[in-house]
Amino acid sequence: MCGRFSLTAEPEELAAIFDLPELGAFPPRYNIAPTQPILTVGINAAGEREGQLVRWGLIPHWVKDPADFTLIINARSETVSTKASFKTALRHRRVLIPASGFYEWHRPADKKLPKQAYWIRRPNNEPLCFGGLVETWMGKDGSEMDTGCILTTHSNEQIGNIHHRMPVVIRPSDFDRWLDCKSQEPKDVMDLMRPVEDGFFEAIAVSDAVNKVANTGPEIQNPGSAKPIIPAKPKREKPDSGQMDLF
C-alpha cells in the first residue's frame, strides 16, 4: 500500500537518473496525497523517455463518469494483469514514479491505541522509483485527464512489521525493461514486481502531522518517539477491488 509519499530531489538530479534532457523546475514536496499531480517517467511516441505530470488516482479509459468511480491510487501486482482496470495499462503504459520515500501507518493490535506514522526512505536518502501505470481518460466533451497509480506488493519482513503492503520498487538497471512496452509483455516484467530486500529501506517514526494533507513542510519528516510495535494477527487480504486504504 502507498497512500502518501514524498519527492524532494532536485530536478537536475532526477533528470540525470532518468537520462532526460531536462525537467522543468518544481519545488520539493513532502506530503503528496491522492488526486494531486505526481511526476511520472515513461516512453513517448518517439520512443524517448519523457517526464509527465498525471493526477494520482487512475481512471480507466472505459469509465463514463469519474465521479461515480472509486479512486484507484494503488494496484496489486499479484492481480494487475487480470483486472479490467489495469491490464491494458500494464501492457501499454507502464511508467516510473520518482520518490524520495513514502509514509506508512502501523495499526496496533489493540484498536484503542492510535496508529503510528513512519517515514520510509533509503538509508542514504537517495531517490527511488515506484512502478506505476497511467491512463488517459477522455470525456464526452473531448476533455482529457492523465491519471496514474502506484503498484504494490506484499511487504518484506522489515516493512511487514509496520504494514503488510509496500510499493513496487523498480531499480535503475531495470528501467529499460520496465518501460519497454513494445517488446516486453506483462509476463516478461512480472519478476520486477516483487518486494525489495530487508535493509533497502529504513523506517523513521514521525508525528501524526503527516495525517493532514495541509501539512506540507519538511518538519513532518522530523523523527518522533515511536510507540512499541505490537504485532497484530496476520491480516487476511480482501479480494482486490483496485482500491487501497489511504491510512
Image (cartoon, helix red, strand yellow):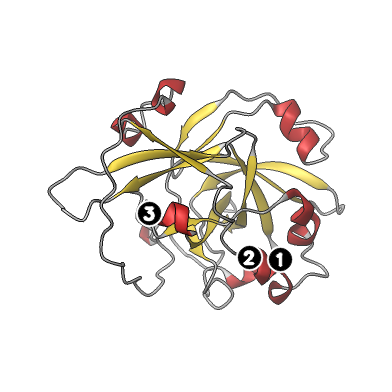
> Measuring 78% from the left and 41% from the top, which residue is drawn there?
18
Say whether disc 3 or disc 2 marks the residue closer to the N-terminus.
2
Query: Which residue is disc 2 drawn over?
Result: 89
For residue 14, which numbered disc appears in the image? none
Q: How crowded is mark 1: few (under 14 residues within 10 Å), some or many (20 or more)?
A: some
Query: Which residue is disc 3 drawn over?
Result: 161
Residue 96 visible in the picture = yes
Above or below residue 139? Residue 211 is above
Asked which quadrant contains residue 222, the reply is: top left
> Residue 165: x percent and y percent?
44, 59
Asked which quadrant contains residue 205, the reply is: top left
Three-letter residue code for mark 3? Asn
Work out which quarter of the rendered image holds the N terminus and state it: bottom left
Element under disc 3: loop
Three-letter residue code for mark 1? His
Query: Which one is in front, 74 or 158?
Result: 158
Element under disc 2: helix
Q: Do the residues labelled 2 and 1 touch (CB within 8 Å)?
A: yes
Above or below residue 210? Residue 183 is below
> Residue 24: x percent and y percent?
72, 27
> Measuring 39% from the left and 27% from the top, which residue is drawn there?
223
Query: Which residue is disc 1 drawn over?
Result: 92
Q: Residues within 10 Å of mark 3 (few under 14, many from 20)?
A: some
